[in-house]
Image (cartoon, rainbow, N blue to C red):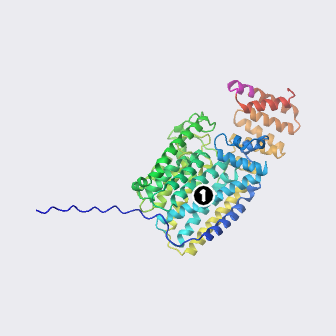
Amino acid sequence: MKKRRRPVEKPPPRAAPLRPPAGGLRWWHCLLGLAAALVILLEVYQPALRGPFVFDDPYLPFTDPDALERPLKHWIGGVRPLLMASFWLNARLSGMEPYTYHLFNVLLHWVSGFLVFLVVRRLLVYAGTEGASREILAVFAAGVFLLHPVQTESVAYVASRSEALSVMFFSGALALYLWRRREVVSWPVAAGVLLLFGAAVTTKEHTAVLPALLLLTDLFFGGGVAGVRRNWRLYVPVAVGGALALRFVWRVLGHADTAGFKLAEVTWYEYFFTQCRMLWRYLRLFVLPIGQTIDYDVPWSRSLLEHGAVFGLAGLLALAVAAFLLRRRYPLASYGVFAFLLLMAPTSSVAPIVDPIAERRMYLPLLGLPLVAVEFLRRWRIRPVALAAALGGILVLAGALAQQRNRVWGSDVALWEDAVAHAPGKYRPRSQLAFAYFKAGRCAEAERHYEIASRLVAPDYRLYYNWGLAHTCLGRTQDARRQYLAALEDCRRQLERDPNNQAARQIVRLVEERLGLR
């Protein structure tokens, strides 16, 4: 009796090669595109480029009069060393002249836009988009990232350089991973990704989600679970790096005054309930960027039923389920939805931050959101010239809106007048507007807004001192003295609670000098 031969098992089909098809863009196309993008960006951001330091900018280390005398190692000895090194370079080049600081931010934004172009172009290859449409859609996605009005805060605000610099490293790591020459990740590529990941997470902690985004990318476009196993050279060191990054983030949150689980203003679950609403606000700002402001006035959701948080959560769950079920039919859109939720998670999930919403938190997630639009645009049966014209019109509109927003950021008075118009009953915009008026020599308006601010919350030593400065400017000596003494009394109360309160100590010194007590 003959033995039956066992059928030979065929090896599973290999994933599609990672290299893009021949043809397409040439190097000089990229150079021309980069030059055009830089010219457009400089024009759009021109109002803010000539603007002053605003809000928290004056508290950055380069404003210290002794900063330039200190060596570089002093600047980079704490957290975010690459960010501090960039400020050190600016200070060396131009001292306290704001222009170069703003210009540096624009240049970082420009580089990140090119990296977004590379990322989206490769994802379009994976999705099977070919020809001129692929290049047009990649340029459009990069243009949305560069010109969307919601990006203005991250670029025009010097203190938000951590966003632009960290996202440049983040998108560089993702582009390097996607543009590798071999299907299996090599050790040099793994080392490059890990190096850029380290640079990103030590510049701003929210980029610690990069390993999760790489995993999501492999699951969608790299062969699924088999692709993840194949790229163990990357995932083993990145997993170790991710664990170290999470430990680093946890340590930073433990010492932060405006974020972390020790915040008195809000618990982790109240923050989560609120973010179930705020994520929809972010999506609305992406689609319809109106009503922008530096300081939103939104109430906390102290329970799931308060302010519609339950509907926000239900909508997010429905969105995630729909993206999962439609992942094969609409891969880019599904990937974009999950990327958005993932990239928003560090700032908009359960780790409390004192401000429930801030436009700069959208800077990183704008890597993913344009992919949702690109998914449906690539299915639009239209000639490439007509497609380019239609999408070009959208980018022109976005650029015009961004330039209009930059005019607001070009003046601290305009910035805080805009904020007060959007949140007239909130203390911080009102007090910041008063201080902006004082700096501009408009002391009567400053005094009036300090008086309004004092009715919104219980005044503290900062308000008393600044209010006293406005009275001094107006020649009201007795009113100024009354405010200075109130500031001094509040400072002493604060120092009894916390003897290390350096801000209170500084106000004590300034008040005593003004009152002749020293």
Q: Is residue 316 visible?
A: yes
**Of the pair 443 and 509, the residue shown nearer to us:** 509
Check the picture and name the quadrant holding the C terminus.
top right
Identify the residue at the far left of this view: 1
Tell whether 387 sits left or right of 477.
left
Q: Is residue 363 visible?
A: no
Compared to residue 435, the image places residue 396 above or below, namely below
Query: Which amino acid type is marked by label 1?
Result: Leu
Q: Residue at x 68, y 41 (%)?
A: 426
255 lies left or right of 350: right
Location of mark 1 (residue): 288
**Quadrant (top left/top right/bottom left/bottom right) for the N terminus:** bottom left
Q: Is residue 87 above or below residue 399?
A: above
Residue 294 placement, left or right of 70 = left
Q: Which residues are magenta?
A: 491-499
Asked whether residue 262 is drawn in magenta, I would say: no
Q: Residue at x 59, y 43 (%)?
A: 356
Q: Is residue 349 above or below residue 186?
A: above
Q: Rate crowding at label 1 as few (under 14), some (14 to 19) or many (20 or more) other CA atoms within 10 Å.
A: few
